[in-house]
Amino acid sequence: MKKLLLVLLLILFNIYFVLPFDKEKLRVGECYVVRLVNGDLIEGEIKSFVSNEDGEGIKFETELGIGEIFFTQIGDITECTKYYRNGHKYFLLPSAIGIGKNHFVGMLELFFLYAGIGITDYFSLIAGRSLLPLAYSNQQLSLINVKGSFPKIVFEDIFRELHLAFGGNLGFANNNNRFLHFYGVATAVFYKTSISTCLFYKMGSEDFYIVRYGINAQEVNYPNGAFGLSLGVDSRLPKYKDIHIIGELWNIDIARPTHSGLFLGVRISNTTFCSDFGICLFTQPFVVPFVNFVWTPF
């Protein structure tokens, strides 16, 4: 029995420590997060493979420059897209990065259930519906968002990548209030930060809407043909790869600067779960707490 247990422990040791990653699957030009055997985490891009008298390894470019890392120094290595799986969105703003294989289910503000899937790296679909208490079925909120992403453009200069995308979304605030938008978004990816800017256009035939919640009603003025602008920032804390600072600035009608809002918060994430906590500041003025939970099981 003791011998069998020893054999099992040796097998587990070889699986988890001797063969932590498959060298054959590493690709030049891709971004990876490397965990060294001393516990340090390094993010960067593989420029080439090396083999010399010191052993085999990779030539790895980080924000500090290019250096050589040998396979004997690596404890584990993970693609950036698998290490941080929420780069396709900020709080509400979609980035130009596609969802890809990072299909997810989320809960926004504890009452809006939504899900997203990627079709290859270039097409993304998000759909959701609210579960507002005390609201009738025809008073709930619904949303469908479709996004098409172009292949990324790689740079060797200030930022690493540029992503471009276009899309549209159809939303309902009550069944009879339809909001249709078309948008274009650009995302610049740095080593620890991504910055996006989005220009969107509201289409439809209505300028005024009556939004009902239970027995309450609120008039909303959102002119047809309005152009809006949004900016988003996602910046990872230097020493904490699982903690990000998220910010968004929205203006739904650039002809009326007062119709603006600011989202600020923190994101805590790993390869499966993501939690956003923050506040929303509006020019009316009022402040609203913001929470969002995402599960990426696949």
Image (cartoon, rainbow, N blue to C red):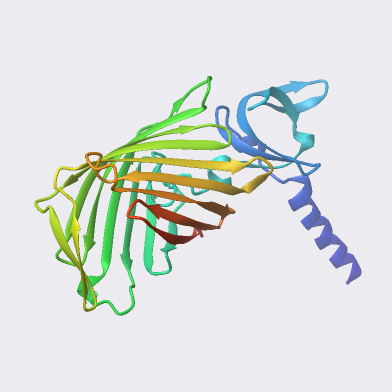
> Quick check: 127 left or right of 293?
left
Q: Is residue 109 visible?
A: yes
> Quick check: 75 left or right of 179?
right
Q: Nearer the viewer, residue 38 or 264?
A: 264
Q: Nearer the viewer, residue 48 or 148?
A: 148
Vertical placement of residue 245 versus 140, above or below: above
Residue at position x 78%, y 36% in the image? 73
> Quick check: 222 left or right of 157?
left
Image spot of residue 115 (x, y percent) = 38, 60
Q: Is residue 61 visible?
A: no
Image spot of residue 291 (x, y percent) = 47, 61
Residue at position x 55%, y 46% in the image? 245
Q: Image quadrant of residue 192? A: top right
Q: Image quadrant of residue 2? A: bottom right
Image spot of residue 130 (x, y percent) = 32, 68
Residue at position x 22%, y 47% in the image? 181
Q: Quadrant of the N terminus?
A: bottom right
